[in-house]
Amino acid sequence: MAIAHQHPFALYEIDSLLTEEHRAIRDTVRKYVDDRVKPDIAEWFESGEIPARELAKQMGSLGLLGMHLEGYGCAGTDATSYGLACLELEAGDSGLRSMVSVQGSLAMFPIHAYGSDEQKNEWLPRLASGDAIGCFGLTEADAGSDPSSMRTNAKRDGDDWILNGSKMWITNGSIADVAVVWAKTDDGIKGFVVPTDTPGFSARTVPHKMSLRASVTGELVFENLRLPASAVLPGVTGLRGPLSCLSEARFGIIFGALGAARDSLETALNYAATREQFGKPIAGFQLTQKKFADMTLALGNGMLLALHLGALKDRHALRPEQVSVGKMNNVKAALEITRECRAILGGNGITLSTRSSAT
Ligand SMILES: Cc1cc2nc3c(=O)[nH]c(=O)nc-3n(C[C@H](O)[C@H](O)[C@H](O)COP(=O)(O)OP(=O)(O)OC[C@H]3O[C@@H](n4cnc5c(N)ncnc54)[C@H](O)[C@@H]3O)c2cc1C
């Protein structure tokens, strides 16, 4: 069972499918994660607190925020580069990839795609550099999978808009400088660019999370929040707006989930090679090798799919249902791989110290 001993990406010759620029971006982000994230991630996870502003500035200076957007201080890379960056970030922690996905694909993308020149000039350069943090408010406590049932509404008052309602499970919600909020109006669902220091805006952090602990999740409340006419995103009306943003973010998850899987697989391979039971390393048992062989195939196939979808996106030919296929396949594969890897680590699989010492 020779494949069990090879790194999946080496077996599939993934590097041969990447350009020099792809490899350079991947290596830069991997080094950043190794140097600046992995040493502290266990502590951030355990405490449920992350130095979000510091991380945003570091990732902004690396060009990772809104990196696949053009202009306004954004790096303007191709989609595959963005995916590879997501993969390396999620090899550090899903919370870190989540932060970059939300900033780039959910806060910056709608302003870039549907915003006025004034909105773009005001927010995009600061969001790209990490000097400002953005969030995306679509989900509500009673409107999750079905966002059309949202209750948050915006009503005209002269030229102004008055926003009322609340949003739940909002990544970076309680630390953001600006929120892109989706609300019902008499003309359909519209997006609003809301500075979080506007009177009538309040936010709290959701406590006691069991997952995504190294990520800030918040609840936003709008009470008679008055916005000027210029706050509305002029370029889109209806659910098409927020759904197009979710498609952008899902694309990053197609790659990102594989980062969590790859890091788990590398950790488990190292562990199995040295952990001895019944007189030999557990990697020496054929049953363990079968597990590694299955995981190698799932990870390698997921990577081929991700790169194919990235190439389609770079040709502007990627359809939303293809993004969903990629996300479904790769998240499922990543869940199965990470669960199996945790089992291979036995008791040590449920401690944070194993992870940081083994990787
Ligand atoms: C950590 C975290 C961060 C998040 N960040 C953001 C953010 O930044 N911005 C934002 O707007 N939202 C955010 N969300 C919200 C996320 O998008 C929602 O959780 C998601 O849309 C699901 O909504 P829900 O949790 O209300 O679940 P529900 O919609 O209530 O679903 C519950 C279950 O029912 C299933 N289900 C739903 N409909 C059907 C159906 N028709 N048939 C069969 N099964 C169905 C679902 O698959 C799920 O298993 C975040 C959530 C989390 C947990």
Image (spheres, rainbow, N blue to C red):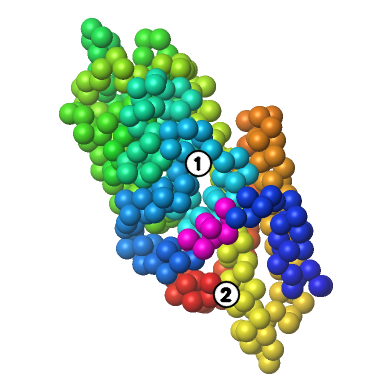
The amino acid type found where label 1 is placed reads: Ala
User: In this orientation, does residue 238 appear?
Assistant: yes
* Image spot of residue 57 (x, y percent): 36, 50
Camera-side residue: 21 or 120?
21
In the image, residue 290 sits, relative to residue 86, either above or below, namely below
Give the quarter of the image for residue 73.
Answer: top left
Please give the name of the residue rendered at 69% of the width and 50% of the height, measured from the top-left corner.
19
The amino acid type found where label 2 is placed reads: Leu
Image quarter where the N terminus lies is: bottom right
Q: What element carries label 2?
A: loop
In the image, residue 312 sits, relative to residue 343, either above or below, namely above
10 Å crowding of disc 2: few (<14), some (14-19), many (20+): many
Task: Identify the residue position indicated by label 2 in the image.
Answer: 345
Task: Of the two numbered discs 1 and 2 on the same chain, state the one appearing first in sequence.
Answer: 1
Task: Identify the residue position indicated by label 1 in the image.
Answer: 75
List the single residue furthest toward the left: 199
Distance Cα–Cα, label 1 vs label 2: 39 Å
Camera-side residue: 61 or 220?
61
Which residues are the magenta region?
Answer: 25-33
Q: Is residue 300 left or right of residue 70?
A: right
